[in-house]
Amino acid sequence: MKRLLLVFLFLSSVAFAAPAPESLPNPAQEAHARALQKEFRCLVCQGESIDESGAPLAADLRRLIREHIARGESDAQIRHYLVVRYGEFILMDPPVEPATYALWAAPILVLLAAGAVAFFIIFRARNRSESDGQEESVRS
Amino acid sequence: MTGEIGQLALCLALALSLVQSVAGLVGLRSMQARAIATSSALGMFVFTVLAFGALEYAFVTSDFSVALVANNSHTLKPMIYKVTGVWGNHEGSMLLWVLVLSIYSAGIAILKRGGEELTSAALGVQGLLAAAFLLFILLTSNPFLRLDPMPFEGAGLNPLLQDRGLAFHPPVLYTGYVGLSATFAYAAAALITGDIDRLWARAARPFMLIAWIALTIGIAGGSWWAYYDLGWGGFWFWDPVENASLMPWLVGTALLHSALATERTGAFRVWTLLLSIMAFSLSLIGTFLVRSGVVTSVHAFASDPARGVFILLILFLAIGGALALFAWRAPKLAGGSAFQPASRETTLLINNVLLVTALAVVFIGTIYPIVLAAMGTRISVGGPYYELFFAPLFLALMIVLPFGPRLNWRRGDLKEALRVLYPAIGAGAVAFVAVFALVSPRTVAGAGSFAVAAWVIGASVVDIVRILRGRAIAVAAFAAALAHAGLGITLMGVAGTTLWRSEALEVLGPGETMHIAGYDLTLDGVTVANGPNYQALRATLEVASGGHTLGTMTPERRMFPAEGQEAVQTAIRTTGFSDLYLALGDDRGHGRWTIRAYVNPLAPFIWFGAGLMALGGLASLWGRVRAMFFARDNAAVAEAA
């Protein structure tokens, strides 16, 4: 992430400063917007969501999301709108689709495989332990 | 002149590291060759120190005829940042990497742990690594290149890096990264000599511990820096560079536990070797990710394809070579162990399964987007992906954890363990009910996290009480209790900050007040202040709570004219249990400024817990050192497990 660039842009955003911080008058809609904007990546600084970012683009996107929410659009519509314009890179979390099946499945497969191996090792160690029962336990 | 001395010293270090590897590996059975390997390692250490000293001298005296100094330093820079600026750039940080490697080599050569032949083979492997990285420095990243004509003034150092804590971040982290090379070298040596037993695990353990302690401190320090320096109140961003340091830590933690079993009962020998190889391989992958420019970050000082290719080559040779050696020799070393399902071995196995899965999550999350990008698809993997998997894995790990120290090796008694742990179960139940009932917003995740944390900390307290009553072996059990309690405390910090954080963003004029989580913040005004090499815009805010004035806080934005860059300086007021965190935002005109305020409950616990973990590691290391120097009888050595 270009934190440096982030800080720089953040500070140079003086020139673009909006007259007031973006927020919706309706508290429920505002809370909704806050939750939704955590899902989108700041395209300038890349490591953070637009919720956390100080880059001007992130501020524009926050305002954009609020406009769409005020119009009563669904989350799916807003997500689609942003993905069409900025690509899937804008989603903090990649969608589940053929290109990312492996990404989502891999941790579960690793856990299952490692668990199976561990189970096998414990099973074998127990059999060995039963067969030479003389072996006494070692105190910690 | 110093530049030439440094250059010459590096060339001599390279020659000696080659001698060290040949003598150490080929002459493993010859006494003379082993002596040559030992003295080469010491000589290589001396010349690396000399080269590093020469670069330090050039930075401290602002010798701008050295290109690296001209590009990364400035006469007005405070002295501390001239000294630490040596590693605030690619070339210097690689030299630091080799310096740390040479210190470990010298340590291996002097201590000769595990016997003459094992030491010799380990030195041979260390020599190969040193040679590879010295070649990398001399061919692609020479820190001593001259500049003609010599510029009048230097370009300065990235202001984000001009920070007292961050100045010492790289040496600490490298002590961890490179320390794993010693364990790697010992693992390769065991495969070469065909000798792996309980003594091997005992020989390698101090190096594992030092590396692990340094990684723990380095990662916690980096996270603390991100917390107070970036101005967004976050402590972990799942940035590829952060992940690069987390991966060796996860494997290192698994290794510390698996090696414990190897040392006490000879179990998991082959697996411990594989973990040793993996831990350092991940350090190398981390170095590649950070140094090659594959990922962009404040850490990637310069991206140069030639460097990336060179590091990739080192990576393939080291990892491929070690794994080939492993595949060839490991089957001969295998030998099953015998233990009951209810035994400490089983808990350590569960620990390893969960930690290796956590590693897989980080590894796949970091590498997958890079691979997909190479195929033309750009996706991003962010915090939610990692957190989705990390939360259940670590909670499961911590639920099993307290049983480990309570079960004996080979054959444990689960009922007895549970009986001893009754107080910890009680602590967990109380924590769940209290958090669920009293803290709002009410979340099961929050109450569950605190229950697990209380269970782990409670178990540690039980252990410490038993130690004080003389019912358990002191040093090792005490070390484990400290480190485990630290993990519980860190969990509380992470849960508290993520689940119950308050934030407010407002535009304030002089005399106006904003409110956050019981605090009233009144802006006095924003003034200009001068630092040694920067100018600051400093906001002064009165902090009050319930009508009582608590003091003032001064978040700043600093402009560094020499570098033409700016940095934010947050203001944090901590009670030890919660942080009030302020950052100065942009100028809205007419004396009005954006102020971002956060209240992060239990945030200090994150780093306090990490500190306890490191302290646990130190206690364990102390037990080793004591055994090494003071206790002559075997029993005392074995005791300090």
Image: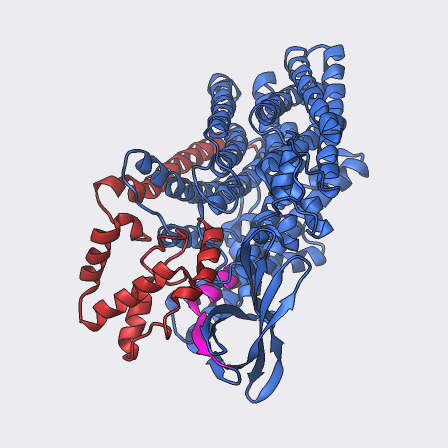
Chain colours: A red, B blue
Residue at image coords 46%, 26%: B309
Task: Using the image, determine if residue B5 lies above or below residue B97.
Answer: above
Q: Is residue B436 left or right of residue B626?
A: left
Q: Residue B121, how many percent across, how many down?
A: 64, 19
Residue at image coords 33%, 74%: A23
* Quadrant of the image occupied by residue B100: top right
Q: Residue reaching furthest bottom?
A: B547
Residue B505 is inside the magenta segment = yes
Task: Using the image, determine if residue B127 lies above or below residue A100.
Answer: above
Q: Residue B610, how many percent across, how many down?
A: 59, 54
Residue at image coords 51%, 38%: B302
Magenta stretch in the rendered image: B491-509
Q: Is residue B473 left or right of residue B566?
A: right
How many numbered marks does the figure carry?
0
In the depicted view, which residue is nearer to us: B604 or A55? A55
Q: Residue B316, how many percent across, how many down?
A: 47, 24
Residue at image coords 74%, 43%: B60
Q: Is residue A131 visible?
A: yes
Q: Is residue B59 left or right of residue B227?
A: right
Which quarter shows the C terminus of chain A? top right
In the depicted view, which residue is nearer to us: B416 or A63? A63
In the depicted view, which residue is nearer to us: B507 or B103? B507
In the depicted view, which residue is nearer to us: B461 or A139? B461
